[in-house]
Amino acid sequence: MSEILVLIGIAVVGLSGLPGLFARRGSSGAQWATTAIAVLGNALGLGGVVRFWTIGDSRPVAWPWSLPGAEFLVAIDGLSAIFLVPVFLISMLGGIYGLGYWSAGEHPENGRKLRLFYGVITAGMALLVISRNGVLFLFGWEVMALSAFFLFTTEDEQKEVRDTGYLYLGATHTATLCLFGLFALLHAASGSFMLVPLEPGVLTPGMKGAIFVLALVGFGVKAGLMPFHIWLPSAHAITPSHVSAIMSGVMIKMGIYGLLRVTSLVPDPPLAWGMAFLCLGVASGVLGVAFAIGQHDLKRLLAYHSIENIGIIVIGIGLALTGRSLGRADWIVLGLGGALLHVWNHALFKALLFFSAGSVVHATRTREIDHLGGLARAMPWSSLCFLAGAVAICGLPPLNGFVSEFLIYLGLFGTLGGGAGRSFAGAAFAAPALAMIGTLAVACFVKAYGAVFLGTARSEHARHAHESPPSMLVPMAVLVACCVSIGLAPLPFAPLLQQGISAWAPAITADGPLLSVLAPLGWLTAMSAVEVAVLIVVGVMFRVRLGREAASGATWGCGYAAPTPRMQYTSSSFAEMLVGMFGWVLRPRTRRPSDLPLFPRVAEFRSDVPDVVLDEVVVPTFRTGAWLFSRFRVFQQGNIQMYVLYIFVALIVLLLWR
């Protein structure tokens, strides 16, 4: 029954955009109808997941399919349920958010397309998560990939949007090509396309290596794992913000799901797999936040933080893989438990941050941080929601980001020794890297929040800002409540995470320790409650004293009689020192006047942190390849006799080769 509910939800949400196609452009009634149908479908999907958790009712659904090797076989297990929750929840909230952010009246030219593919991508993601057949998995994967392309190119009249869409299309189909090879190898090993665990010994070392590389590239591109992230920053920046929320909060997690599902099928993963995941996770986490610090575009900054958080999740998966290789159930429980909880947490606070950023864009019509400032007064609720998301993404208590990172910390410190079983202290190197990620994230969001919401307005866009409508604020409030709930009371979520862990490694964790035993989740609740109480008391005391004694004045006025917005820190000046520390990899571009007179009339300073992998590796490589292949145009003579000669020569070569 759980699977049937989820399938009905998938069908309803996938078809939710059809009514809008038969209504006139700009029809608000059609938009409300689409949203209502999508909310119903997402609610049915969530109902199926809740039924699975409460009743344990899982009955696989198998229908015949005419495609060779394919079978419409779907089932829910603990791992699928974990990933279904953000798929349906964020899609539901994003649809409601879109009523005010991308209204039919303001966007009659592309609103119907956006709402149609918003439902289709939700259906594709949910389908691939419950698929138990490789062909059906690839079907859902491609539906998701193509829907994302149409969503990314919503405003396709802009050249930047078209270029970003083509970049994404090339990257995602490179990933799909790798997945074709991956499932072909799994079919060769098992004799079918069923996604079931392989028997021990059926994979040779060479096949294991090929499966690992293909899975890492195929799923790593979709997840935005560095250095496969080249499509992500631009795509998340140029799309409508509720699309950015579902892409960053949910779609990139499908790459994480694919990695977990495939690694669960391999009975004896080598130790090198875990170490590779740990190293890639550390690199993605540290460099992702380092690139974020140097950004001037608010949404591009948030996009790089998605790369950072994918790195944190992959660190947890690497710890769990290391535990499977060495038979350490405690490492599996803590590493994978932290990773799965961070899948939820990142979906919640990243959607919240993109919704808040969308509120800023909706009010000011700009994403440039240096054109904003002082928005907390005009947009108090959006400001508060962004602040909550910033605290959560930085891993600070008492919000949810702290809990998942705490679990990963416990597992990493556990590798230093102690406990029953083999030890491997080399994995603990990721702990200080995780601490560095958190520190840099705090610095980045101090910059972002301070430059966007504090101080004074730097432009006319910011001076005329206004608060967002309730249809945008209510989804943000729901996400804040979710972040607070997990942060203050993580213990009730431990059994749900335990089911996901057991589905991934049933043989090792069947008689192993429970997450609620290994991690002091009850103490976290007590500590968070004390912290909240202290914050409330200090805040009230500060407010009372401020009202009695403080004088009002311009923020950062510094005692000047006539301060101007130009006296404030900009995103460049705030991040200059940190960007300089990572200059060896960020390769910042700075343009400043070389020689200024004493009283210059005009002076201009610009700084930019490009994506090194895309701009200095991928693009030059493709340009070189295009130049080399252009040399072969000499063979295109346009003469049929020459082409017959080419065929004759090719046949002779093949005969001699044979």
Image (spheres, rainbow, N blue to C red):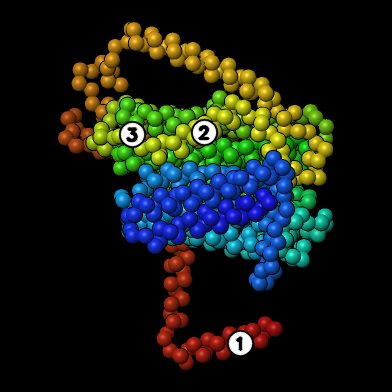
The residue pinned by badge 3 equals 467
Amino acid type at image mark 3: Glu
Task: Tell me if residue 70 comes above or below residue 531 in the rendering.
Answer: below
Q: Which mark is residue 393?
A: 2
Q: How many marks?
A: 3
Q: Are marks 2 and 1 in contact (CB under 8 Å)?
A: no
Q: Position of residue 471 (x, y in %)?
A: 40, 40
Between the residue at mark 3 and the residue at mark 1, the CA separation in whole angstroms equals 72 Å
Q: Position of residue 67 (x, y in %)?
A: 65, 71
Residue linked to disc 1: 651
Q: Nearer the viewer, residue 86 or 281?
A: 86
Dot 1: element:
helix
Mark before the other along the chain sequence, 2 or 3: 2
Residue found at x 57% / y 52%: 9
Mark 2 or 1 closer to N-term?
2
61 with respect to 403 (left or right): right
Please tell me whether residue 584 is drawn above or below residue 126 in the rendered image. Answer: above
In the image, 568 versus 361, the foreground residue is: 361
Q: Locate residue 22 relative to residue 16 in the image: left or right.
A: left
